Image (tube, rainbow, N blue to C red):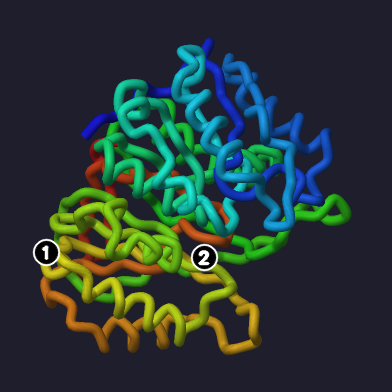
Amino acid sequence: MIIPPKLKAGDEVRIIAPSCTLPSLEWMDEAFLERAKEYFRSRGCTVSESKHLRERNVFDSTNIEHRIEDLHDAFKDPKVTLMCTIRGGWNCNQLLPHLDYTLIQNNPKILCGFSDITALANGIYAKTGLVTYSGANFYHFGFGTQMQYTYDYFDRCIMHDDPFEIVASKAWTADHYSPEKPTFDFRPTEGFWMLQEGKAEGTSLGANLCTFQLLHGTEYMPDIRGSILFLEDDYESHPRTFDRDFESLTRQKGFEQVKGILIGRFEPRTANGITPMDRSQLTKIVASKSLPKDIPIIANVDFGHTNPIITFPIGGTVRMEAGKEGARIEVIEH
């Protein structure tokens, strides 16, 4: 395990786009981007943009060579401590065969993002042992104080070394930002769903399930033995697809030695109108799997494609407990 240096005042934050690029966020104007940059400046950091951040092709991205160049430049630059992805997307798994993993291993930096970034974060950890992070994309930092829960967990994981407990948010939203409606409507959270009792400590891996699945059978798939698996999916998923993707994961080598499972909050809609996931359906899906009966499974945790979200390490150490008295999740090493 290689834990990169934490972000502190005086460090540089590089905005990168290993998946979709800045222009694909058509709602993001320069004023919004400036607000996001100001979040880091207020903490004494400087902010820079990767060379090809503002390019856009027919895939809402840019070519592999440009994305690789931007990643390598950030890892080489001694001023850069944090690489924060502008957003997720669909194609950063294209980069994995082209990365210089010796360069990355010799220049450990913080890489943070989520969704499609799951492939890059887990792939880099698998190849180098460098702890990466699933959490806020750069655009999150333009939302203001309505995302304070997101900011608090980002700071705890990225700027501090101390262990921290993940406590359920008090409210959540599935709203999408637009300049016409910059303030989200929040609803009370139900808290964590305990789907199976148990205690566990292990290596935190995973995140977006359908993206994590892209690594199956490749050299970029981390060893899941002894892990705490974080799993979530977006509105393009629904109970039927999540069920089969989860089934595929349970058939991966070493799954019988997984220590625990954390499942993120699902969106209250799907792309094709199929009934979205709820607690009853998820409980049935979990019950249908050949899972060890002594591993804890906790769902409705604050990560995934609703807001707010936590930041957690890929390759760190997490402890979890689910029992009659409630659930507890702690990030120990990050």
Kindly identify the amino acid type of the residue bearing the numbered disc 1: Gln
Quadrant of the image occupied by residue 5: top left
Q: Residues within 10 Å of mark 1 (few under 14, many from 20)?
A: some
Indicate the position of residue 167 as horizontal and vertical percent values: 39, 51
The residue beneath circle 1 is 257
The residue beneath circle 2 is 189
> Which mark sits nearer the N-terminus, 2 or 1?
2
Q: Is residue 2 left or right of residue 141?
A: left
Vertical order, 204 against 46 (above or below)? below
Which residue occupies the foreground of this view, 114 or 105? 105
Vertical order, 8 against 299 (above or below)? above
Quadrant of the image occupied by residue 98: top left
Determine the residue positioned at 59% across, 35% down: 16
Number of disc labels: 2
Determine the residue positioned at 17% across, 63% down: 258
Quadrant of the image occupied by residue 31: top right
Q: Which of label 2 and label 1 is nearer to you?
A: 1
Residue 197 at least partly seen = yes
Q: Is residue 199 left or right of residue 326?
A: left
Which residue occupies the foreground of this view, 314 or 172? 314
Vertical order, 273 against 334 (above or below)? below
